[in-house]
């Protein structure tokens, strides 16, 4: 049995949903959870960098 990942997207290409089918779903879902954690961490550091840069550029 193979695992397939299906995505539903809006007209402009933004993802709406991800559906995982197949027998190895329990192997794929933790990978997505890990990617979400890394994305949240990267977003947090991007916001922090923007704040630090804004403070440093103040005259």
Image: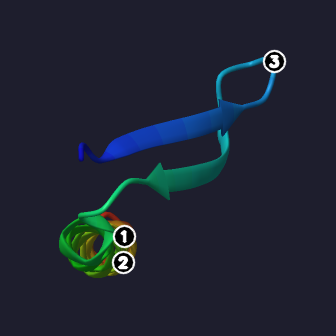
The residue at which mark 2 appears reads as 40
Q: Residue at x 52, y 38 (%)?
A: 6
The residue at which mark 1 appears reads as 43
Observer-nearest residue: 18 or 43? 18
Where residue 22 sits: x, y (%)?
37, 54
Q: CA distance from mark 1 to mark 3?
A: 25 Å
The residue at which mark 3 appears reads as 11
Where residue 34 sits: x, y (%)?
21, 78
- In this view, which residue lies farthest toward the right? 11
As displayed, is residue 52 above or below residue 42?
below
Horizontal arrangement in the rendering, residue 27 relative to residue 21 (left or right): left
Q: CA distance from mark 1 to mark 2?
A: 5 Å
- In this view, which residue lies farthest toward the top? 11
Q: Residue at x 35, y 73 (%)?
A: 36
Q: Could you say whether the residue bearing mark 2 is in a helix, strand or loop?
A: helix
Q: Quadrant of residue 49?
A: bottom left
Q: Is residue 25 visible?
A: yes
Horizontal arrangement in the rendering, residue 15 relative to residue 49 (left or right): right
Residue 32 marker: none
Query: Which badge, 1 or 3, comes first in the chain's sequence?
Result: 3
Q: Quadrant of residue 8?
A: top right
As displayed, is residue 5 above or below residue 59?
above
- Quick check: marks 1 and 2 in contact, CB under 8 Å? yes
- Quick check: marks 1 and 3 in contact, CB under 8 Å? no
């Amino acid at each position: 049995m193979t695992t397939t990942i299906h995505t539903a997207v809006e007209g402009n290409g933004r993802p709406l949903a991800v559906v995982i089918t197949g027998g190895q779903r329990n192997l794929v879902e933790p990978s997505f959870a890990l990617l979400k954690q890394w994305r949240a961490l990267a977003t947090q550091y991007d916001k922090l960098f923007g704040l630090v840069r804004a403070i440093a550029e103040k005259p």
